[in-house]
Structure formats: C-alpha cells, structure tokens
Amino acid sequence: MVQLRVAPKDFPTNGRICGMDGNNSPPDHTNAIRIDTNVFRVSSSIDCLPIRPVRPFSFRGYDGHAIFVGASCNYGGLIKIDELMIQRKSGIWPRISLAIVVIVLCTSTKSVCQLKPKALIITGNGNVPEVKEAYPPWIHDFQNETVMDILKDEVVIDISEDFRVLHPDRLLEYDLIINNSLFLTPDQEQLDALYRFVSSGKSYLALHCGILSFLNWENYEAFMGGFFVGGPSTEPESFKVFTTNNEFWGYPYAFRAAAEHPVSYVVDDFVTKDELYYFQPSITDFHVIARAENHPVMWWHPVGKGRVMSLTLGHDEEAKRNAGYQQLLVNGVRWLTGIPLIHAVSPKPLSTRELTYADFIPLQAMTGSSGSDAITFGVVQSNRPDLYSLSCSPDGRIDVQLSGKTGTANFAVVAQHHSGLSSKKMVDIHVVQDGVGNIAHYTGNTATCSSSENQSPMFDIHNILDNDLSTRWSSARAETAWVTIDLQKAYPVAKLTLHWEAAHASEYRIQGSLDGGNWQTIADVAQGDGGIDTVLFNPVDARFIRIEGTKRAAERWGYSLYEVEVYQ
C-alpha cells in the first residue's frame, strides 16, 4: 500500500504511479508522482525505492518537482511497495488522504527493484559561432548520440548546451554530470554550483576534449587534478590501452599502497585507433585507471565527498565504437553512480572427472569487491538444464552440479547493491570429457613454485594455468627454479607445451609423480631456445607434473613462463 497525503484534493498524481495507469496495465518503465518539494517532505519504507526530484513542473499554480518513486524490474517477479509518506515541511497535515495499491508485474524469475541513476551531458563548442580570444581555433564533433546509446542501459540522460542548468536547484535531480564539450566558459556562479554538486557527494566525468572546458575557472587545476599539456596526437595511429596498472613492475612502494581500481579490474587491455591527449597530474591523490603510450588516458580523484573522473579517449565515431572504449565508459559511469561492476570472466573448462564443483566462481572476485561492500548476488539459471544446474548463496558462492553430458551453455550473474542498483553479466560454461584437450586448464587444478619474482599478481604462479598468454609467472633470480602442477588425478601424460617469456631456460627437465613426493624424470631438454617448446614422450601416469629449470638463458633474470599445457 502506498499512502499519499496531499493537498488540495485536486493535487496531481500524473495518472500513472509506479507502473499502474488508468487501465491497470503493466509498466515498461518507472513512472513518477508529482509532488511540490518546496512544501512536502517525501520518505519511503522500502530501502530499494529511491526517491528524488527529477524535473521541475507546474500544474494549476503548483510549482515543484516530479518525484521518482517507482521501481523498474529487470529480472521479473512481483514487487509490492508498502508505504510512501509525503509530509508537509511546515504546518499541519492536510485532511485529504489518498491510498493506492502499487504492483509491478514482470515476466522473469527474479525480482530486482532498481531505479536508474540520472546523468546530465553538458555539450557544445565554445568556438561557435566565434573563435574565443586566446584559445586555439579548434572545433570538435562530440557524437553525443553515440555516447547516449552506449550508456542507455546504465543511466537516464538529459543533454544541454545551456549553462543555466548549472544551478543548485536544477542539479538536484542528477547523480552525474558528463562534460562532452570544448572550450566552454560558464560564469563563476555556475562553476561554483558545479563544485558544490560534486563536493557534496555527486560525480563528474570529462570525456575527451571535455578536459579543455572550464579553463576560465581558477579552481580548474584542483578540480581536474592537473592540466592539459599537449596533443592531440595521432601518432601512433593505433595503440594498446592498458588497464592493469602494475606500478613499478609489481614491486611495492614504501609511500603508496598498491590497489587496482574497480574499473581497471573489470576491463581488459585492448587495442584502439584513437588520438592521445597529454595531461599533467599535479595532485598526490590521483589514481590512474587506464594508460596508453605511458600516459594516463583515464583517471579519477576525490573532490570533497564526490568523484571527478576523466576519459580522454573517444576522438571520433570509430574510436567510440571500440569495444574496449565502451567498457571503460560504461564501467566508469557505473562506478561513479554506485552501480556494481562485474568482470566478464571466462571460467576454466569443467571436466567430467567430477560431477560437483563447490564454489565454482568466486563472485566477489568478479566484482573486485570485498564482503563489506554490501553486494548480494543471484544467478539466472542455465539455458542448458540438461547439462548442469546451479545454486548460489547471497554472499556469492556458486556450486555447479554436472549431469555427465558435455557441451557449452551460459547463465547470468546478477550483483545488487544495497541501494537497489544492480548489474548483470553473462557467463559461459564449457563442460568437456575428462582427458580431452589441455588437461592443465581444467577447473580445480592448482600450481605451486619454488619462488616468485615478487608478491604481485603480475608474477603469480597460477598465471601459467589461466589460458592467457598476456600473463606470466616469473621466478626469483636463481639458477634453479621449478613449477609443479597438480592435475587432481593421474592421467597418461604424453605431451607438454611450454610458452616461455624472454627469461627462458636453456636447460630444464620435466618430471612426473603420482603422490607429489616420489618423482621420475620424463624428459630432459638440453638446448632450450625459448618461445614455444613442445615436448613429446611415451605416456607416463602422473598426477603431478614438474618443470625444473637448471640453467638460465640470461643470468640477469630467473625463469618466466606464460603458460603450461598438458595433454594425454
């Protein structure tokens, strides 16, 4: 039951309230109740029912703001909103009372109460219609329609070229301001309103040449975290964007804790064709999310209680259509607005050697979150129930029960913040017949080593089993080092493929064991030349496989492997 106490009797409710219109038809989006927020105070008994002003209105002499009180349902179910209280800020309660039952009908299996955050895009060319004095004569296209298309599933978007929107009352309805402009120069009152918006706990995102607006602001450098120093550069024409920022090659700094940003965590490195801007950070609390050609291309820093982020990629339509760019933009907006982030993991193959896999995917790891982040998880069941079934606990533990068949299927992971904001990501599962393909890559296998170059994930031993040739293990600088793979059961092993980094072994041996204690040498390699080594031998029953380097190709380093593959 939603209880509305309003005055006078003809005060508008805008026809539809949270999805029920005059014909009692189900909704396809969130609706609003119009309430004069200058007179009434609004609260809700439902945590996942956000309430906030969304836009000014005028009706029969009443001026105020529309209030979103509805719930959108992404994954189905039945939602009943218990109570919404609208109270006069002063004076006595009106005598008029209106009671409304609100039900949102959806069609799937799990209900999620979610109201999208709202963003304002500020756009425009400061050099139009006339070039500004003391500014370069640059004019830029912004592809605002493309930006809005990329973000359509994340936020509700308004767009404006009118600086008057930078007013405290107008900004109340927004969670995020996106600056997609060039050389705009709002006045001091408007810039002050922007600063108060962010410092009070909201967010700001500058896209590409948006970092070149507001240059008339004396607070620009502190607000942006630095200043533009050069560009745009179109050389090289194509380049790799790195989201994994292993500062100092994984070695620890005494003055700075190593921490991977959530956006970096969920977006993989990618190659793009774009142009580069060069930005000089000038504050210490400056955090790089992505870099290219050793320059930051995405970063953030705190301003008061809020967040300021910049993404300098996205010069043109082609650059904005790059999948990696879109992932940076989408996940940046998610992080700025409090929507959970989920990494699109590719789980290792499930072998039929076991039919039950407990804690198959650590969902907290998919989000890069800790248990204190108040995120709960759910799954939408497999599209192949004949292949496997899933169970999921609220703290993010997924158990898988196989049927014994082989094949490929997928399911959706849903992560929901306590605010009601949620994300969904599809996960593919591959079930293979035990013993087929690269045995080392099966789910459940583990690896150990004699040493690692440092404690960074950059050189972790499990990188040799992740089927990713961009990650590696690296030993400490020593003449002898080894890695051991536990295949969880004995197999008739007949072939190994080793992917060496430049720090390869010129001499090494391959050993096998049934118990991890008694070893037999399977093969000796005396003239290793790095790159990819494929070693064939007569089948040997072994659960444990060890590769032991006995002579380094370069004394400056230890040994380093990208990947180890094991076959029958």
Image: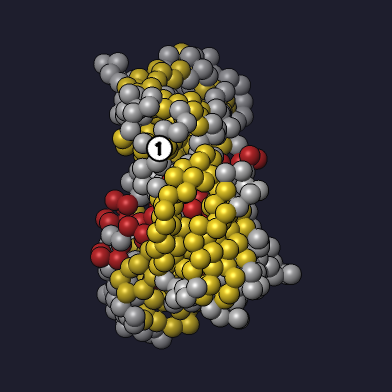
Q: Can you identify the residue that label 1 sits on?
A: 434
Provide residue 36's location: percent of width, then percent of height: 47, 33
Q: Position of residue 317 (x, y in %)?
A: 25, 64
- In the shown orientation, is residue 28 left or right of residue 4? left
Q: Mark 1: few, some, or many residues within 10 Å (few <14, many ≥20)?
A: some
- For image coordinates 53% across by 14% down, the residue present is 95
Residue, far right: 254
The image quadrant of residue 497 is bottom left
User: Looking at the picture, does residue 238 appear above or below residue 390?
Assistant: below
Q: From this view, report whether residue 445 is shown above or below residue 399.
A: below
| Residue at 61%, 26% in the rendered image | 91
Query: In this rendering, would 546 be left or right of 187?
Result: right
Residue at left offset 56%, top offset 37%: 375
Q: Circle 1 sits in a helix, a strand or a loop, which is it?
A: loop
Q: Amino acid at mark 1?
A: Asp
Give the side of residue 178 with respect to residue 483, left or right: left
Q: Is residue 219 visible?
A: no
Residue 179 percent coordinates (x, y): 41, 62
Visual colour scheme: secondary structure
Which quadrant of the figure has residue 253? bottom right
Q: Quadrant of residue 24?
A: top left
From the viewer's perspective, is residue 399 above or below residue 425?
above
Asked whether residue 506 appears in the rendered view, the answer is yes
Q: Is residue 275 above or below residue 456?
A: below
Residue placed at 64% from the left, 69% from the top? 480
Q: Nearer the viewer, residue 546 or 364?
A: 546
Pick the front one: 352 or 184: 352
